[in-house]
Amino acid sequence: MHNNSKGLSGADWLLALVVIVVWGVNFVVMKWGLQELSPLLLCALRFMAASLPFLFFVRPPKTLSWGLLATYGLVQGVGQFGLLFVGMQLGMPAGMASVVLQTQAFITLLMAAAFLKERPQPWQWLGLCIAIVGLITIGSAHGNSASEMTLIGFLCTVGSAAMWAASNLITRHAAKYGAYEPVPFLVWSSVFPILPMLLLSVWLEGGVDAMQQQLQAITWKGLGVIAYLALLSTLLGYGLWTQLLQRYPASTVAPLSLLVPVIGLISAMLLLGEFPTGMQWLGTLGVLLGMLVNQMGGRWLWRSRGS
């Protein structure tokens, strides 16, 4: 039931701030995890921790088919997070990853236009064009120093954003079958990426022996990373965010996601010493401005016509 008041209540502002900080710092935590674990194994462990302990306590979503849960789990788990973790391992800075990943909003826009026949508004096309210029600017600033990025890391992160967009369309499709229950949906869909990620890790990351060595050498820091990614970023973050979307119009809640890459950049500078180059700052400004136009353009146009 949507709250018809103009803005979020004080308590809901606090919940939104918790989600924004958890999701923003998430990218630094991923980097810490990749210091101990290979990306595909870390991804598998994240989904194991987000699903297996809860299967006996959380019932499966009543209105959704197993095929839909499996499709979402594979696209989001293997596609989005597999590519993101690999990209960060291959030289994508945490702060820049938090910015580039937000382009999922525009890819979702294009996919919805192509597959769902949704018509983007003129200001959304404008926002998309601005963001593409920003993205090209970030991509052209790749290099090998600590403050820059590798091209392969950048491309993997763009691929991750595309997989996130695809999972958004699956979620939208799932909503047609009844009330969307975020925690059961996330817990049970998280089962499906586990085996593919473990098999890919064995195949691409040195075999069973390498996996055993990593698991035997894991520290409390590594376990803390897995717990953060599974419990805070996934279950708590998505659970609270979905609650906010159910209480308020999307136009009120969605723009708050603009703050996630801001927190991502600040936390990466403070905790990892990652300082973007001038070109990366310029590109980041373009992506954030494009997102702002995409999210707020309709409201600005309505106000200008009403004045």
Image: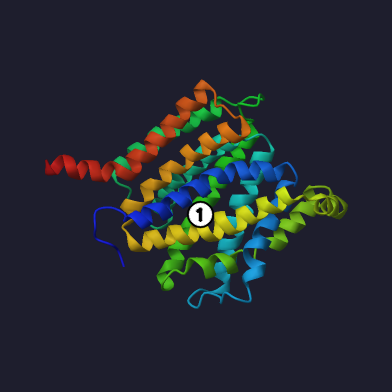
Q: Residues within 10 Å of mark 1 (few under 14, many from 20)?
A: many
- The quarter in which the C terminus is drawn is top left
Locate residue 125: give its quadrant: top left
Query: Which residue shows up at 34% across the image and 42% down it?
Result: 294
Q: Position of residue 84 (x, y in %)?
A: 61, 45
Q: Residue 81 placed where, x, y %?
A: 61, 51
The residue under the point 33% across, 37% down is 126
Q: Residue furthest top?
A: 278
- Quarter of the picture holding the N terminus: bottom left
Vertical position of residue 229 compared to residue 181: above or below = above
Q: Amino acid at mark 1?
A: Ala
Q: Secondary structure at mark 1?
A: helix
* Image quadrant in which you'd find residue 244: bottom left
Q: Look at the image and tell me whether residue 148 can be seen.
A: yes
| Residue 32 in picture, x, y percent from top left | 67, 42
Foreground of the two, 64 or 129: 64
- Residue 288: percent from the left, percent from the top? 41, 36
Relative to 99, does residue 141 appear above or below in the rendering?
above
Q: In the shown orientation, is residue 97 left or right of residue 193?
A: left
Which residue: 59% across, 69% down?
A: 188
Q: Which residue is mark 1?
A: 166
| Colour scheme in use | rainbow
Residue 100 in view here: no
Q: Residue furthest right?
A: 209
How many numbered discs sit on the rendered protein?
A: 1
